[in-house]
Amino acid sequence: MEIFESHISDLAERAFMRGYSTYSEFLNLDEISRLHTLRLAVKPELFGGYGEAERCVACFSAGGEKEYPISCICINPLNKKFSDKLSHRDYLGSLMNLGINRNTLGDIIITEEAAYLFCLDSICDYIIQELTRIKHTSVKCEKVSELPEIISEKPEESIITVPSLRADAVCSAVYKLSRSGASELFRGGKVFINSRLCEKERTQLKDGDRVSVRGKGKFIFCGEIRETKRGRLAVSVRIYK
């Protein structure tokens, strides 16, 4: 972690002293959470290629032009009829087998038609050239400048009932866990609220909070709707599948 903090501090210091923008590699949730606690010469801005990205590049800018070094690759099966049903793990595993560092890769979004991979510009051409097969499926990769609308769409609103607005209560309802099971997620350091690690299960969620639970998924908390006749709270959430 000291190496990470030193690297981030150096990026911020160079941006501040030289008046241009510097960029990190893709950061995971743990690193983004740690980033928020650091006292830096320049406040970072985060972007992962699209608005809802979980893995992001940090930009440090002291007035220079911002141009995130992020490319998007569309990965299509050559023959959809005979292609495997590929998971996030399948795509990531094939990329790792190419000897690629994880920090050069952002989110992988899987749609019914194709998958979209966000990566650093520096590794884009290599992936397009070398990624030709995932499991038993032959694939074609091409760089795209525009994303399909489905990537920007937020999931449909769902209404759930909870005993309170505590983060553990809402996570329990969203992921159909026992209260003790939800508490274990917090104790295990698996819950992030607005990209910050949350270890306090009593934390009260607020409208617009984005909750990521490692191993489970993520959702947006949209607020309380009403109190039920039994004294519980009906709340709105948007759950990413």
Image (cartoon, rainbow, N blue to C red):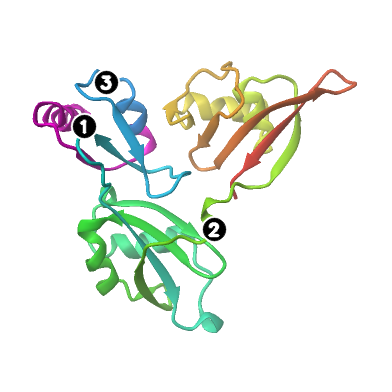
Badge 2 is on which residue?
149
Above or below, 22 against 186 in this view is below
What percent of the width, then of the height, locates residue 107? 40, 51
- Residue 211 screen position, x and y as percent: 54, 33
Question: Helix, strand or loop at disc 3?
Answer: loop
State if disc 2 and disc 1 touch (CB < 8 Å).
Answer: no
| Residue highlighted by disc 1 | 63
- Residue 226's mark? none
The residue segment tinted magenta is 1-30
In this view, 97 is above or below 222: below
Where residue 20 sits, quadrant-wise, is top left
Q: Position of residue 197 (x, y in %)?
A: 43, 26
The image shows residue 167, relative to residue 99, as above or below, that is above
Q: Which is more foreground, mark 1 or mark 3?
A: 1
Amino acid identity at mark 1: Gly
Residue sitting nearer the eye, 192 or 114: 114
